[in-house]
Amino acid sequence: MKKSLAILLAGAMVVASLTACGSEKKETTAETTAETTAETTAETTGESKAAADGETYKIGVLQLTEHAALDAANEGFVAALDDSGISYEIDQQNAQNDQSACQTIAEKLVNDGDDLILAIATPAAQAVAGVTTEIPIVGTAITDFADSGLVEDNAAPGGNVTGSSDLTPIEAQIELLQQVLPDAKKIGILYCSAESNSEIQLQMTKDACDAANLEYEEFSVASSNEIQSVVESAVGKVDCIYAFTDNTIAAGMNTVSMVANENKLPVICGEEGMVEAGGLCTYTISYYELGYLAGQMAVKILTEGADPATMPIEYYPAEKCTFVGNDDTAEILGIDISGLE
């Protein structure tokens, strides 16, 4: 199955010129820890400079909303800062999925004169990038920086924004769906129409369904208040639901799973936090590792003078994607996923 995942994602790289995926947080083994430790050790020049200067960096953080994936990315970012040995003050701000709050917080962080700003999720990065072209911005949990208007090109950003992408292995997740649910013919695609990153993933999902000869129907919400009624409307119309990494849906996953599981409607998810909140299963990246990578990029900018304009958007290798299943949900649905682990 891992071989199949790698082949599918290699094809996606040719078509979309993008790669993605990180390892699952709970599978961050001693080997992974050793790798990140080695990478951090390689930054000794910058760390020594920072220590010698005795400088304390001001770092602002704008997180779009609270849910498991974005929280993990935030934790990974802070861990990378701590591991680097730099001295820093951090201002953690959460917009609670409110666009106007994103704008207000972005302006505050810029006015505070932060040395660097971390933006977690696409709307947060767009808000900050709209306020400053001078302060370095590192984004994470963003599907496509270029398509979202944050950079000129993912390989050569060209401005003050760079970061790590959370592009998920959509083709592999659709293949997983077919393996778990071989009789499924029609898929319900659940997403929030207000998120630009979801527009990108929606088209990728449609393409993957077409390639797999699966029918599909879109079920979109404009806000979290519509999640329950929209999921209820999918019951009886589709054989299962596919929910990619949409922030509104991820934050409301408890509601999604409540309705879906009650009606024996399986939900294949975009990442592990959504599975833990009641979805059936996924092939997932690790948002903790994604945030850690963003933190390493931030340290290079702060201590080595690295220029975001020349720092390509970072992706995780396909082979680090891992299968995650929810045994309780599988039992409720009467589906055996044990052989996939």
Image: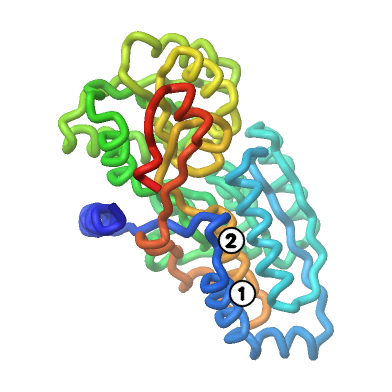
Residue 203 visible: no
Label at residue 301: 1
Which residue is at 67% across, 59% downward?
A: 117
- Residue 197, placed above or below residue 312: above
Q: What's the coloring here?
A: rainbow
In-image side of 105 versus 37 (left or right): right
In-image side of 255 versus 62 (left or right): left
**Nearer the observer, 5 or 51:** 5
Residue 273 visible: yes
Callout 2 amino acid: Val
Which residue is at 67% across, 40% downward?
A: 102
Q: CA distance from mark 1 to mark 2?
A: 9 Å
Q: Secondary structure at mark 2?
A: strand
Q: Where residue 74 sits in the image (x, y, percent)?
A: 66, 54
Callout 1 amino acid: Ile
In-image side of 264 versus 130 (left or right): left
**Nearer the observer, 319 or 134:** 319
Which residue is at 84% across, 84% downward?
A: 54
